[in-house]
Image (spheres, helix red, strand yellow):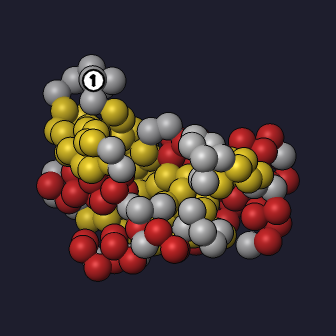
Amino acid sequence: MSVVKSKIRTIPDYPKKGILFRDITSLLLDPEGLALTIGTFVDRYTGKGITKVAGIEARGFIVGAPVAFQLGAGFIPIRKKGKLPAETVTEEYDLEYGKDVIEIHKDSITPGDRILLMDDLIATGGTMLAAARLLKRLGAEVAEAGVIIDLPDLGGAAKLKRDLGIEVYSICEFEGH
């Protein structure tokens, strides 16, 4: 969607030289862009039986919570290790230089839950794969993953489909990394 894409700024050489960082804060500051983004997801998932939306820390919270509210669904925060107070389930995943861990509350999933997994962007897919594995391990059906931005050259959406059978819906794509 060209209106949404036009409101996302690109910051070169962040967080390191050679990276083109796709910054959604400029989109979030724009009332039209924010409304269009949330509305696009709500239109897509209305009537699809979504019982909960799971958002990946932290930008996944920004889009996931209002989508959950509009769908009449619950919201599950997926956080970095050590940020949730009750009993959690964790999943380790690879980063470019090392490993990281995400977690959710063990009681976040009810049998039969149909989950929409959300984040702002999918690149290599490591965090999204880990989040989907967590949800599936607790018995959830992950209906689809929704992101504002896909970076298809980095292969994350294709990896999520290939490895876990989960389709990724994106509002816009950017070439490169």
Q: Which residue is mark 1?
A: 82
Counting from the top left corner in percent of width and height, residue 149 is at 60, 62
Whether residue 145 sits left or right of residue 45 in the image: it is: left
Residue type marked 1: Gly
The foreground one among 74 and 126 is 126
Query: Which image quadrant is residue 86 in?
Result: top left
Q: Residue furthest top?
A: 85
Which quadrant does the C terminus fall into?
bottom right
The foreground one among 62 and 139 is 62
Which quadrant does the N terminus fall into?
bottom right
The foreground one among 155 and 88 is 155
Query: Which image quadrant is residue 126 in?
Result: bottom left
Counting from the top left corner in percent of width and height, residue 111 is at 18, 55
What element does badge 1 sit on? loop
Counting from the top left corner in percent of width and height, residue 151 is at 55, 67
Whether residue 104 sits left or right of residue 15 in the image: it is: left
The foreground one among 86 and 94 is 94
Counting from the top left corner in percent of width and height, residue 132 is at 29, 58
Q: Residues within 10 Å of mark 1 (few under 14, many from 20)?
A: few
Q: How many marks?
A: 1
Please tell me whether residue 52 is drawn above or below residue 62 in the rendered image. Answer: below
Whether residue 46 sits left or right of residue 3 in the image: it is: left
Residue 46: in sight, yes or no?
no
Please tell me whether residue 127 is drawn above or below residue 58 in the rendered image. Answer: below
Q: Residue at x 36, y 40 (%)?
A: 78
Residue 102: in sight, yes or no?
yes
Q: Residue at x 84, y 46 (%)?
A: 30
Please tell me whether residue 1 is drawn above or below residue 65 in the rendered image. Answer: below
Q: Residue at x 50, y 52 (%)?
A: 119
Q: Residue at x 41, y 62 (%)?
A: 124
